[in-house]
Image: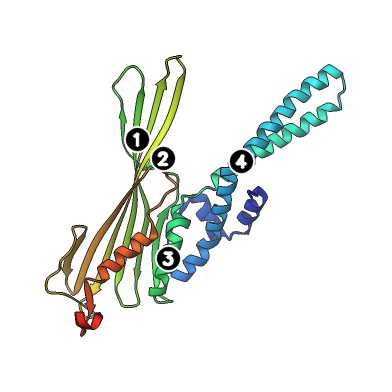
Amino acid sequence: MADTKNVFQQLKSLDPEQTQIVETKKIDGTHTAQYWLNLLRKIAILDKDGDKVRLNSSLSIKMIVSGIVAFFSIFVAIGTQIPYILIITALAVGLAIKFGIDNKKVKKLDLSNHLRSFLMPFLSIIKEDIPKKSKVQIKASFEESDQQEYIVDQKQGNNKGYPKIKETYFKIPRLEFKATLIDGTQIHLEYTDFVRKRNVTKRNPRGKIKHKVKYKIKHLVQIKLFFHNGIYNVGGSLDLPKNIAYTTKGQTHCFKTKLVEIVPDEMDCMPTKKVLAAIAGIYKRVQPVGKTNADMQ
């Protein structure tokens, strides 16, 4: 059940570093995988419980009800000439203001689902393949998609009548993840959202104007794996699918792949399993030095 008080208590329990992440909706640092998980876990729980309150709309309903009570109590006080009823008016106004402020605070705490639906499960799994003391570099943005700083293009329909259409395009660098695995392989992951926000204004036959906002989101995840040729070999003939590229650089085998997912809802994220499967697919293209394909089967 949605609990506003619980959300605010969780917010107060955060340490300064966690509080800064919630306020800026961004992270940029280098820590061990376990440190990152410990740091982000309470934030993810706060965001999940906050979503329950935001989706419940209970604060908005309470604010409206309090406002209605305040409005009618004024007329009752005037009509009955009983000044004490104004106490109810004052209390109702105070509650309406409080619920309005709380509602605004809870909305301000909202973080993109990329934190708890992608980064946390991804980090929890891949941490098992990262040395305990090895540092993981993470840079991420958990802001809403339609921020001014992420606008890359805008288009306005030329039609003078209805419907009127305005499209705004955003490019959001959601996540950069860099780590070195136990086997010495380096993994670089970049997660980018491309968002089209379409504002449509229509007029129905009765002359009533209606506004609609529609989103189209493309999730793009690019993965690079760098294998040292002293640890891994690559087969003589690589039969690579179109979405995997292979190059060599010095003593390194470089594989690059990308995943694309198009969704209509900002709440959706690239499935973590899909990313992990892509990484596993690249690993199938290499084999440890000294071992043959038969040994790997």
* Chain-order first, disc 2 or disc 3: 3
| Closer to the camera in the image, 67 or 2 | 2
Residue under pointer 1: 168
The x, y position of residue 53, in whole percent, is 60, 46
Q: CA distance from mark 4 to mark 1?
A: 28 Å
**Is residue 27 visible in the rendered structure shown here?**
no
Which is more foreground, mark 2 or mark 3? Answer: 3
Q: CA distance from mark 2 to mark 4?
A: 20 Å
Q: CA distance from mark 4 to mark 3?
A: 32 Å
- Rate crowding at label 4 as few (under 14), some (14 to 19) or many (20 or more) other CA atoms within 10 Å: many
Q: Are marks 1 and 2 in contact (CB under 8 Å)?
A: yes
* Residue at (49% x, 66% y) in the render: 37
Residue under pointer 2: 146
Looking at the rendered structure, the secondary structure element under dot 2 is loop
* Residue at (52% x, 64% y) in the render: 39
The x, y position of residue 249, in whole percent, is 17, 69
Vertical order, 135 against 86 (above or below): below
Q: Are marks 4 and 1 in contact (CB under 8 Å)?
A: no
Looking at the rendered structure, the secondary structure element under dot 3 is helix
In the rendering, which numbered label is found on residue 103?
4
Vertical order, 293 against 97 (above or below): below
* Residue at (29% x, 55% y) in the render: 259
